[in-house]
Image: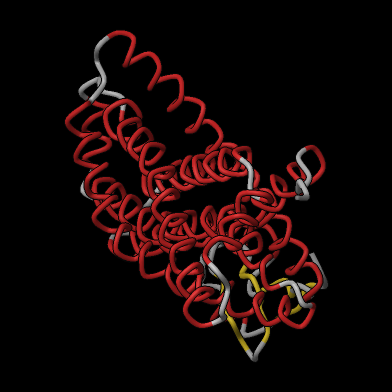
Amino acid sequence: MGQWKFRWPCFLSALSSETIKILSGQRIIACPATIYGCGMVSEQSPISVVRRNFSETIVGGLRTYGRAVGVGMESVGGAAGDIARGRFQWREMVHQFWYLITVTAIPAILMAIPFGVIVSVQVGNLIRQLGADSLLGAAGGLGVIKQGAPMATGLLLGGAGAAAIAADLGARTIREEIDALRTMGISPIHRLVVPRLVAMVLVAPLLNILIIFVGVAASYAVAVAAQGVTPGSYWATFGSFTVVADVWISLLKATIFGFLVVVIACQRGMEAKGGPRGVADGVNAAVVLSVVSIVLVNLVITQLSAMFLPVRLA
């Protein structure tokens, strides 16, 4: 605990044992007079403070991860059980599905167009220097389908979708609606989380397909109009290097990203506390954790697909 020192005993004698003050630029803890004597305080070293905060952060992160895993498992089991018993909240699911479509469709198109153009221009310049202009279709297809579309889908859902879900559930938690549901014997997971989970899992692959279509179309337009590639060679190389398995992997990535986003957003929203500030903190945490999770999971899936499904040459 450090070395005990006397400082302003008359002032500290009026403090409780839990009071922490910052005096003379140092952190000192007032201790009960009955145990340590009037005015005796403990000065903590910076190393001990950093060690304690670091350990608390690690333990808190592991506990949060465990709760998120529990929410995900309960949601998946609840979705299967509700559908089997005919108790699934179809109206809520359709409402959330349409809402996610409205907040992500237009941004998806706006992201897919410049991404396809960037891939076509940057890769096209490199391929032209190598004298292989006809391979631009293969490069554009692989770039958009395998990486661009699922990442754009995940980031859109992690931004707009996660923020909307976390804000909605956080506001309900602050207004004690979640506690009211539990009091009435209604599971918040079955009533609120499961419909959002199903809606997000359905929206993710559809959004991924939209981004693939728009991105490949933009790449094709730039390649043919600005870089002199013939339409036949573009689609020939596109079909030679891009196989159906690449599309399925892209759809699987988008679905997994959507699942991660909705579980993280629901967990952070249902644990919001502290009023409007707590809701804002929950939304911020949901977005940040969703993006980080998407990047890490994308890295793992990309490595696995490269090992077991390498690029097929023409």
Residue 97 occupies which quadrant of the picture? top left
Residue nearer the viewer, 41 or 168: 168
Residue 235 in the image, given as x and y percentages of width and height: 56, 57
Residue 203 in the image, given as x and y percentages of width and height: 36, 43
Residue nearer the viewer, 86 or 181: 86
Residue nearer the viewer, 304 or 220: 220
Residue 114 vs 267, above or below: the answer is below
Residue drawn 21% across the image and 33% down it? 180
Residue 79 in the image, given as x and y percentages of width and height: 38, 22
Residue 262 occupies which quadrant of the picture? top left
Q: Is residue 207 left or right of residue 224?
A: left
**In this figure, what is the number of numbered marks?**
0
Residue drawn 72% across the image and 75% down it? 127
Residue 259 visible in rendering: yes
Q: Quadrant of the N terminus?
A: bottom right
Figure coloring = secondary structure
Residue 119 in the image, given as x and y percentages of width and height: 59, 72
Residue 300 vs 3, above or below: the answer is above
Residue drawn 65% across the image and 77% down it? 124
Residue 38 occupies which quadrant of the picture? bottom right
Residue drawn 68% across the image and 57% down it? 35
Q: Which residue of the protein is positioned furthest toward the top in this rendering?
A: 85
Q: Which residue of the protein is positioned furthest toward the bottom in this rendering?
A: 24
Residue 79 vs 234, above or below: the answer is above
Q: Is residue 96 left or right of residue 69?
A: left
Residue 60 visible in rendering: no
